[in-house]
Structures are given as C-alpha cells and as structure tokens.
Image (tube, rainbow, N blue to C red):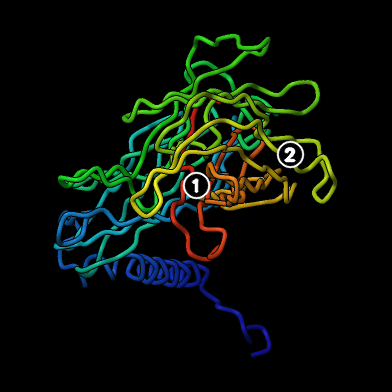
Amino acid sequence: MSDIRGINPDPFMNLLLKKVVYSFSLAMFLYSCTKEVSLETGAASGNASGILTDSIGQCKKATINGTYYINSDLVDTNFVVVNVNFTALGKYLIYSDTVNGMWFIDSGYVLSTGAKTIKLKGKGRPLTAGTTDFKTYFGNSACGFSLLIGGPNNGSSTSSYCPTNANGWIRYQLKPGFDFGAGMVLDTFRASISPIPFIHQGKTYFKYQTTPTLDTLSVTGRNSAGEYWSLGTPEFDYLYLYDTVANNAEYIYLKDNVIPGTPNATWETAIVRAGTIQSGVLFLGNARLRITVTNIDLNGNYLGATFTNIIKVKREMLFTPDGTSSAEQTLLVADIYYAKGIGMIEQVLYSPNTPNNIIQRIVINGYKGL
C-alpha cells in the first residue's frame, strides 16, 4: 500500500487525465471568450450599423487623448474617443483617414444598440507640426476632428512671437460671430502669411491676409531689441472700430523681453486723427493706444494642448474728442495673448468699466506651416 499512495499506477491513465483536464480548460477558455458574441449577439458574423452623428445629423465633439510630437511614434495613450449611435448589433469597424503620417482605428463587436463611445487607437508617426484635420468613418457617416502636433516652440519652426513663413496660416474662431445681416454670420476666419513682404521706414513687414474677409494685418518679425511692430490703425488685431481714420500709425505692439511692472512694460503709440460714433453722433478727435505687458511665461490650454511661454498684453483704445474741455477717454480694452512660435492665440475685448462683460473674443482654432 505504501507503494501506491498518491501515485497513479497506470501512466496511460495519467496522460489521459491530463488531456481531459487540458481539453476542458481550453473549452472553458474559448467559451468565455466567445460567449458574449455567439450567445448574446446571436450572430457573430453579422455586421453592426449606426451613425457618427446625432438625430439631426450633427457631429458630436471627439475627445483627444495624449500628446503628439513630430517624429514620435504614437503609443497607447494616443487615442480619440468618438460618439456612435448603433442601430444594429454585430461587428464594427470605425477608422480615420491617414493624414500627416497618422491614423486612428478600432474594431470589435457591439452587443446592444444606442449611443456609445468608442476609443480609436492612434497609429503611425506625425511628420509635421501644427494642426492636423481628420475624418472618421463608420458605415455611410463621417465626422471630423483636429489635433495639434507639437514640438519646440509650441510646434512652430521659430522662437519668434510673430512667425513669418510664407503661406503659413492661423485659423481663428469668433465669439460671437460677425453678423453681416440676411442670415450671414462669420464665426471663423483664417489669416495666411503673404509670401511677398514689403519695406516701410526701413522695417520689413509681413502681411497676414484674412479669408474670407480679405483684411490685412501688417506686422514685423522680432528685432534685436525684442520688439514687434505693426503698421495700421490704433485699434485691435482683426477688429476695426473707428468709423474714420485719417492715417496709419507705425507702432510697437509687443515686447518679448520686458518685466511686467517696470517702466519699459508700458508704452503708447503715436496719435492719429480718427472719428467714432457715440449715441448716433460722429465725434472727431485724436486716437492712440496704450499697451502694457502684464504677464509673461504663462501656460494655457488651446486646441486640446498646453501652450507655453505665453505673453499677456493689455491694449487700451484711447480717444480725445475735439473741444477745449474734452478729456481723453478709454473707449475699449483688450487682453491679448501671444504664444512663442505662434503669435496671437486669443484676444478678449471688453469695456473698461465692465471687464467681466466680454464684447468679442477671438480664439485660435488651428494653425499650420508656422
């Protein structure tokens, strides 16, 4: 009896027992892996159907996860969450187009209908910096999303606060949009850098030409003193508020090497003759700007990414109406944010008496080629 305690005397039976146990374990594993598909869906080979839009055909905003850098392979944390309304069960494939060396994709089985979120895994390696626009596809529906490819200087090729690369562009969103009447509202525009600079007073100016409004902002790159110049009326970037202006002014609109609170952090432009309508009456007078660097080295979240080295500037629109007893007035104020390598990323316009009542906001909505 002592020879057989705990020992199977038949090696063949021992081998058979192992095979039975292994087969049973494998069957249980396969059953657990296929149970939801084969039993709950009822047809593993069926295809799911649905749409990426809501009931009125509007795309819902995708959620971007991860950081994206030039020449860096996408990893597990690089994914996009999209909204899907499934109308039939089965296998699904949701994917994006391939842009700038990257694409997003996911496949699987859906076990119930209705609104769901699906994580599309990022693949590939970004080739160039800036904003990259994608389209995602499921069945006969398509929706878009954009993400920012970073790198040195917030993804720009320059450390200047005014990029001058020919044909580079920045897209802005207007809040609220410009209402032209007859149902025409402009809520986005794009400013593209003209490939043809011009010389004025010994300075080289570059035109930022807007579409679809065809306005022009003329600015210089950085000079050795850390100054950036503008040639135009003493108002705000892309916002023109005087009803008449007799002549343009050449003035410094930004300094990137001053300390807030010091005398050099505040300066004023030359005076130009201008007119503004108040209470239905046109007043003529002297106009100028007071510009102050209030903050440096700020961070801010734009385009789903963190922008660094932001300079905040306060721009006050000053006006003295004609008349011996008239005093200089502050008509409007704007806080303007400039990011290194990008330029203006946000402009917030408000009344000097009610700073919390925002009149107009311009926010960066994309960029490329800077």
In the displayed structure, does residue 183 sit left or right of residue 323?
Answer: left
Tag shown at residue 267:
2
Tag shown at residue 303:
1
Instruction: Tell me which residue sits at (22%, 70%) in the image.
Output: 112
The secondary element bearing badge 2 is classed as strand
- Is the residue 140 above or below the residue 226 in the image? below
Residue 232 in picture, x, y percent from top left:
53, 26
The quarter of the picture where the N terminus appears is bottom right
Q: Nearer the viewer, residue 79 or 160?
A: 160
Residue 174 in picture, x, y percent from top left:
39, 47
Q: Does the rendering let one see residue 80?
A: yes
In the displayed structure, does residue 314 sit left or right of residue 260?
Answer: left
Tag shown at residue 38:
none
Residue 137 in picture, x, y percent from top left:
25, 44
The amino acid type of the residue labelled 2 equals Trp
- Is the residue 227 above or below the residue 266 in the image? above
Residue 34 in picture, x, y percent from top left:
30, 65
In the displayed structure, does residue 180 sit left or right of residue 165?
Answer: left
